[in-house]
């Protein structure tokens, strides 16, 4: 009857993929972004999943939940640089405070952030980790070069990529001397340029399954000793991220969602046998 290109197949795929997030991305980023969001959702719920509304919420419900305090307690003081935290696409206050609390508890010598954007989270990490080097990676500022890098790759949020003012939040500040801006596609970047030991990772770049997976595996390759891994946008609107997190949960890795946030976190020794088994599977 025409296989995967049949009218019934295309219609069924569209219904399976429909979500509030895909509609929003269509409005903000145009038809190309909307189509990519539909594809992300479809891949996450699987081609033959029964047609159910709220698939993202059900996936989210499978990720274990823990309070922020279970990761070493909430620090007495967290400093906030409030510039650019209200820019569309920046990390919400609630999630930012959780990120900074987890960072202070880890107290790394070096941290790596995937997705710089305006650099608000980057600046706040530097402010709260005065002894650490903060590495942050994003696509080049030049829009034509950035578009060329992402063309044909499974990225999303092109409207945010186009609206970036890369690192604006920390440029010209005292913290800038401890921030290293890396430019490139996170899937193909030469990570030997990042000097370690890195023990705090914030994965907040492109929120597709492919990039969540790639950025995580890149982080595992850099990690040494006890580390904290964080994934932002762990919510019902990013099924690609949820699909990847659930693969780790199902493999026995201690990934949990931080209660009342859109963050997932895993604290683990990089040499833990569970990590090694997962990497070899």
Image (cartoon, grey):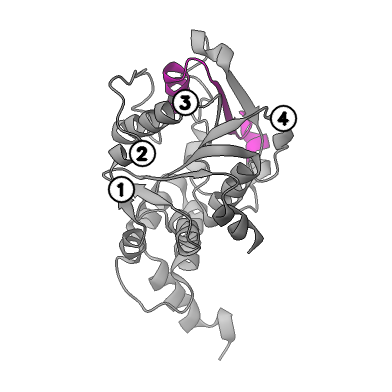
On the image, the x and y values in percent for residue 70 come to: 31, 41
Q: Which mark is residue 215?
A: none
Q: CA distance from mark 4 to mark 1?
A: 35 Å
Q: Is residue 14 magenta?
A: no
Task: Give the magenta-colored segment's residue range.
Answer: 121-146
- Mark 1 or 2 closer to N-term? 1
Q: Are marks 2 and 4 in contact (CB under 8 Å)?
A: no
How many dots with numbers? 4
Residue located beneath label 3 in the image: 107
Q: Are marks 1 and 2 in contact (CB under 8 Å)?
A: yes
Residue located beneath label 2 in the image: 71
On the image, the x and y values in percent for residue 175 come to: 50, 13
On the image, the x and y values in percent for residue 97 come to: 33, 30
Going 39% across and 23% down the picture, which residue do you hit? 84
Q: Is residue 178 above or below residue 277?
A: above
Going 59% across and 32% down the picture, which residue do you hit? 198
Assign a secondary structure to mark 1.
Answer: strand
- Mark 4 or 1 closer to N-term? 1
Q: Label 3 neighbourhood size at 10 Å, few (<14), some (14-19), many (20+)?
A: some
Q: Which mark is residue 66?
A: 1
- Mark 2 or 4 closer to N-term? 2
Residue located beneath label 4 in the image: 193
Q: Are marks 2 and 3 in contact (CB under 8 Å)?
A: no
Q: Is residue 88 visible?
A: yes
Q: CA distance from mark 1 to mark 3?
A: 21 Å
- Mark 1 or 3 closer to N-term? 1
């Amino acid at each position: 009857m025409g296989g995967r290109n049949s009218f019934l197949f295309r219609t069924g795929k569209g219904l399976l993929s429909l979500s509030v997030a895909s509609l929003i991305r269509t409005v903000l980023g145009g038809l190309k972004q909307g189509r990519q969001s539909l594809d992300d959702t479809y891949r996450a719920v699987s081609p033959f999943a029964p047609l159910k509304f709220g698939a993202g919420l059900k996936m989210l419900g499978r990720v274990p939940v823990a309070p922020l305090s279970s990761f070493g307690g909430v620090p007495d003081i967290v400093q906030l640089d409030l510039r650019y935290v209200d820019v569309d696409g920046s990390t919400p206050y609630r999630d930012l405070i959780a990120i900074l609390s987890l960072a202070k508890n880890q107290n790394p010598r070096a941290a790596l952030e995937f997705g710089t954007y305006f650099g608000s989270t980057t600046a706040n990490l530097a402010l709260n980790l005065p002894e650490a080097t903060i590495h942050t990676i994003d696509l080049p500022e030049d829009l034509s070069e950035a578009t060329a890098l992402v063309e044909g790759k499974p990225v999303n949020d092109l409207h945010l990529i186009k609206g970036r003012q890369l690192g604006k939040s920390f440029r010209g500040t005292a913290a800038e001397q401890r921030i290293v801006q890396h430019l490139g596609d996170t899937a193909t970047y030469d990570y030997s340029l990042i000097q370690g030991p890195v023990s705090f990772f914030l994965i907040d770049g492109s929120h597709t399954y492919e990039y969540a997976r790639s950025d995580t595996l890149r982080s595992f390759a850099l990690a040494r000793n006890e580390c904290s891994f964080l994934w932002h946008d762990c919510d019902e609107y990013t099924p690609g991220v949820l699909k990847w997190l659930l693969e780790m949960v199902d493999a026995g890795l201690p990934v949990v969602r931080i209660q009342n946030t859109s963050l997932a976190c895993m604290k683990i020794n990089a040499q833990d046998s569970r990590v090694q088994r997962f990497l070899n599977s």
